[in-house]
Image: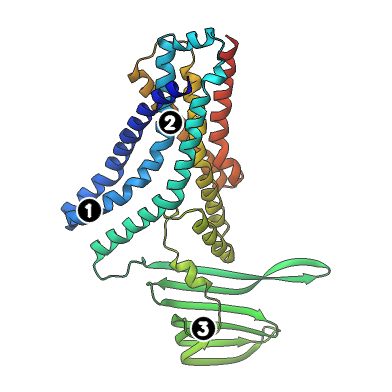
Amino acid sequence: MDRYLASELLPPFLFGVGAFSSLGVTVDAMFDLVRKIVESGLPISIAIHVFLLRLPEFVVLSFPMSTLLATLMTYSRLSSQSELVALRGCGVSVYRMVLPAVMLSLVVTGLTFAFNEQIAPAAKYQATQILNKALKSDKPIIAKQQNIFYPEYRQVEQDGKKSKILARLFYADEFDGERMKGLTIIDRSREGLNQIIVSESGEWNPGQNVWDFSNGTIYLVAPDRSYRNILRFEHQQLKLPRTPLDLAQKSRDYGEMNIAQALEQLEVERLGADERKIRKLEVRIQQKIAIPFVCVAFGLVGAAMGTIPQRTARATSFGISVIVIFTYYIVYFISGALAEAGIFSPFIGAWLANFLGLGISIFLLMRVAKR
């Protein structure tokens, strides 16, 4: 029975992977590449290379959808041809009949996680780099960024209570990939010495682990906030953290990072203390973990809906799959947005749609089992 059900599940699953991957890559990548070939003169060989590198991203997205389609089509056909009725007549329970669908879902979950961690992010990042290099020629790949803002805090203890105060504030008008411009730094990190540094430009010196500033002024302020001294300079080296440069250079999109890289980025963002960016990245990390387990939810939903006695054509099964997928992603995006807004925790925002899918599938299975 297991071999028979597995052989019935595999063809529609492979069909779904091909169909959904082709649809996604055509709508999202191919049309954009064709436009760049026509408008920007992108070489066709590079366009094909980028297209192939973008393909794993859409294969990953197709895995959960294909699991839903395969389980729904297979169990609907078996139900319409009374094969499930025959199995139940032989004493096979509904829960035992859907076990092959669960096993398929778990296998696809592992594949999705492997693709999502090892293949898709690296391929997408490489595609972005190749495309940028082809379109921008010798221009730097790191995009120009503006308004780099990095606060640094330190813990102090007053009257037996610990509190967090500003130790250093780093601001730059612009970063062109190599040099910061329009710098203002407020440094309160040392007791008895406060200074304000204003500089035309600054560049990180990796050999000495210091910042090289050009054409600026250092304003020294006494602890009682009275004037102490003004120092003007053409070139000045200061030992300040490299973190503002790390923040500016982290140009990877969330979709171009795996979980380990996203966790590293989260540590950098926490140093910057931008709560909005920190929360958004926390939600994205939880979503990266939750997405592979959509396969289990979709597999159970498809099997549960398919075991309901009915006569359903393949086209109807495909239509039902599209509705379920559409509904799932609406809940997924809404709960993610609520988590980013602070209404839900990052965990609930990422996993809520999965939990709802599992709950609905278990409810449907219990109803069918009682018949």
- Residue 198 appears in the picture as rendered: yes
Tag 2's secondary structure? helix
Residue under the point 47% across and 10% down: 309
User: Which residue is more in the foreground, 91 or 222?
Assistant: 91
Q: Nearer the viewer, mark 1 or mark 2?
A: 2
Residue annotated with mark 1 = 47
Residue type at mark 1?
A: Ala
**Sooner in the amino-acid sequence: mark 1 or mark 3:** 1
User: Up-down: is 271 above or below 313?
Assistant: below
Q: Is residue 364 visible?
A: no
Which is more foreground, mark 2 or mark 3? 2
Identify which residue is drawn at 55% across, 47% down: 286
Residue 257: percent from the left, percent from the top?
45, 55
Q: Which residue is mark 3?
A: 210
From the viewer's perspective, is the residue at label 1 or at label 3 nearer?
A: 1
Q: The C terminus appears in which quarter of the rendering?
A: top right
- Indicate the amino acid at tag 2: Thr
Between the residue at mark 1 and the residue at mark 2, the CA separation in whole angstroms equals: 30 Å
Q: Residues within 10 Å of mark 2 (few under 14, many from 20)?
A: many
Q: CA distance from mark 2 to mark 3?
A: 54 Å
Eyeballing the image, is 43 above or below 32? below
Left or right: residue 221 compared with residue 9: right
* Residue under pointer 2: 67
**Secondary element type, mark 3:** strand
Q: In x, y percent, where is residue 115?
A: 42, 47
